[in-house]
Each structure stands twice: as structure tokens, then as C-alpha cells.
Amino acid sequence: MKTHEQWTSKLGFILAAAGSAIGLGAIWKFPYMAGTNGGAIFFLFFILLTIFVGAPILIAEFLIGRNSQKDAIRAYQKLAPGTKWHYIGGAGVIFSFILLSFYSVVGGWILSYLGRSITGSLSNANYGELFNEIIANPIEVVVCQFIFMIMTIMVVKGGVQKGIERASKYMMPALFLLFIILAIRSLTLEGAGAGIEFLLKPDFSALTAETILLALGQAFFTLSVGISVMVTYASYLSKSENIVKSAFSVAGLNILICFLAGIVIFPAVFALGFEPGQGPGLVFVVLPAVFNEMAFGSVFLFIFLVLLLFATLTSAFSILEIVVAVLVKDEKEKRGKLAWISGLLIFLVGVPSALSFGVFSEVQLFGKSIFDAADFLVSNIGLPLGALFISLFVGYRLPRNLVKEELSMGTNGLGIFYDIWYFSIRFVVPIAIAVVFLQSIGLL
Ligand code: PFF
């Protein structure tokens, strides 16, 4: 009898991995990070770092997961018994916990918007004011965050095959299609050109070490790498799949969605007179305004919010899954209970983040709001450091023949590509992460 579940098809794995990757990172976070960090220069570094640092790490996580067929902690224990390497997975679980605690807050905002789009109160509103009003309302944000977590728990408790995979198949292509329609609308607004320039014409004089660190954090965030979430997903992957191809498909799709999000948001920002550097509200303020300019805008807005909710949920599933997989071990009968317990705990930990735009807006951690501090801790410390140790683990700890054999499965041989990747994972990736990280905290 099989003790470890598997994805039912090749497409199933790619969709689930892409579902984890594509979410708020590309659609909500990317536009506002680009908006506050110089636009095109941020985008350029984001692309370079996704291809040359993020994708090699994604391959490494897939390799660890598929080879071991274990969860985030036991994978490292199995591959390096009696060592401390499994702390990488332990740290990953803790960071996942914090990540989902604030990710679910934004998931809740989407639910608020969705509710309003049904009642019709989203057409012709002052979107800036509306957004500030929603995120400052303590009851609304906490209730919506709670509902979002319940939805996440309900799917994750059913297991990866039934829940995650089936749900991803239709929604992802639909999201893509709607983005294309939106991009056309946004690009044909009068004055859209300034937005395209903002997104695509880099101004190198705006480049700082912090921009590069934030772009690196963004690349890891959108790819879901650094905290062993992808180790967990790949543990359900069969030996006949090509890991390298899967990783590049996920990375490519991700860049594409970020690009589409940017091409929808920025032309509209400039055409409709919004401020690109306004922060986390950007998408929530600009998108409803774009829909307002469209025929049947409120219907499209509703569909868009459903799809955005979906993209957010498929990422949330993966984050809760790593925690649950570690707790469940092989005792499958406990899965439901453990999903509830961990999901509800994550919700509780996230409540202060949810309130940090209203009741707790005065509370500061390291000079940031609670929400921003949690995000910074995960995106710009947890993910890069996790990725650094994963590259060292694969590059120096795992036997060379194991690495090569695992990566070559499901391929006709990788040729020179393998050597380039192996060199990157041993030298380029760790050095790049270390330099960017030390620079940004002022130690270099
Ligand atoms: N990649 C997700 C997004 O871009 O929304 C967020 C995420 C999921 C980050 C899982 C990290 C992770 F392990």
C-alpha cells in the first residue's frame, strides 16, 4: 500500500505548484513594491533574480522533496541523518506560520471587496477612502480573515489530491484570461503611456542595495521558495516527472503574471491620476477604478475578485499544508484535527496584523507596523536565509550522484544545463544571497 499520497497527473503538480506560486505576491504585492521602489528598475532585478537565483532554488526544493518523499523537516532528516540540517525545515515551518498569519489578512480584504461587489457598493466609490475605511474596521477585517482561514482549512484537511489539485485546474486559466482583457482596457486608457514607461524603462540612478534586497525577497515570495513549501509539494510528485522543466514553467508563468499585473495597474495609475507609491492599497484602489471604466464593469469586477480569491487560496493551501504535513507524519487519521488546530492558531497569531491598519496603527515593531514587520521578517529575512541554506545543503551536503540522478529522472539527460545549475547552486546563488543580504543590513 502506498503510504504517501501523490499528485494524480503531471498537470496536477504543475498546477498546484503554480497555484502556490501565483497569488497575492504577483497580483497584490508586486505592483505596490514596484510602485514604491522605482518601477522598471525593480521589475528588471525581479526578473533577473527570479531566473538566476529563484529558479535554481526552486529546482533544489523540488529535488529534496521528490527524492525524500517526506515533509519539510523529515526530508532533511532522511537525506542527512543525525545532522542539524533539518533546522532548515523547522525554520520553514515557523516562517510559514507567520506568513499565513498576515497573508490571510489580505485574503480577508478580498472577501470584504467581494461582499461589497455583490451589494453593488463598489461602483463609483472613492476607492482610496473606501480601502482605508475597510482595513481600519476591526470587526470586518478580523471576521473576513477568519472566514478566509476557514476556507483554507476546509480544503487542506481533505488532503492535497482531492482539494488542491482539482480546484486549480479551471481557475488558473480563467484568471489568466481575465487579466488579458483587463490589460487591453488599461492600455487603451488615455495617458496609459506613462505607466508603460514606469514599468519598462529602468532608471538606474534609482538603484539601491535595498531595492535589490526587496526584489530578491519578492522573487522568493512569488516563487514560494525558501521555507520548504515546495519541498512538501514535491514530496507528492512521482519519479517520472521532469523537475527542471516544472520549475521553469512555474517561474515563467510567475513572471508573466507579474508582468500582466503591472501592465494592468500602472497604465491605469497614470491615466486615472493615482499615486504609484501608495503602498499595499494600490491594487485595491486602482483596479475597481479600471473596472468602472468598462462596460459591464461590475460583473467583471466580481469575476475578478472571485479569481483573485482563488489565486490567494491556492497559495494559502500550500502554506498551511507544510505545517500540517509536518504535524501529521504518517498518522493520516489526525489530518483533519491538526489542520483545524494549526489553522485556527495561525488565525489568532494574525489578528494583530489584521488590526495594524486601525486599532493597532500606533504599535510599531522595528519602526514598522505589525503587518509590515511580519512581512519584512518573512520576505526579506526568512525566505532569503532559508534559500541560502537550501543551496548550501544541495550544493555541499547531498552526494553529487544523488543530485544528478534525481534531476535527470524524467528527462533525456540535462547536458550542460546540469553543470550550469550545479555551479549556480554551489557558488552563484549563495554568494548572491549573502552579498545582497549583508549589503542591505549595512554589514558590507
Ligand atoms: N507565492 C505566494 C504568492 O506569491 O502569493 C506566497 C507564498 C506561498 C510565499 C508559499 C511563500 C510560500 F512558501
Image (tube, rainbow, N blue to C red):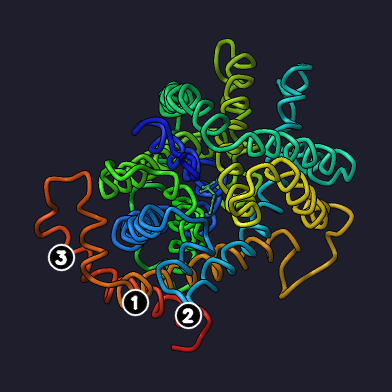
Q: Amino acid at mark 3?
A: Asp
Helix, strand or loop status at disc 3: helix
Q: Amino acid at mark 1?
A: Arg
On screen, residue 217 versus residue 310, left or right, reads left
On screen, residue 116 versus residue 394, left or right, reads right
Q: Amino acid at mark 2?
A: Thr
Identify the mark at residue 333; answer none if there is no mark.
none
Badge 1 is on which residue? 397
Query: Who comes first in sequence, dot 2 or dot 3?
Result: 2
Residue contact at pointers 2 and 1, CB within 8 angstroms: yes
Q: Position of residue 294 (x, y in %)?
A: 55, 16
Q: Residue at x 10, y 60 (%)?
A: 416
Badge 3 is on which residue? 419
The alpha-carbon separation of the residues under discs 2 and 3 comes to 27 Å
Q: Position of residue 311 (x, y in %)?
A: 55, 35
Q: Position of residue 155 (x, y in %)?
A: 64, 34
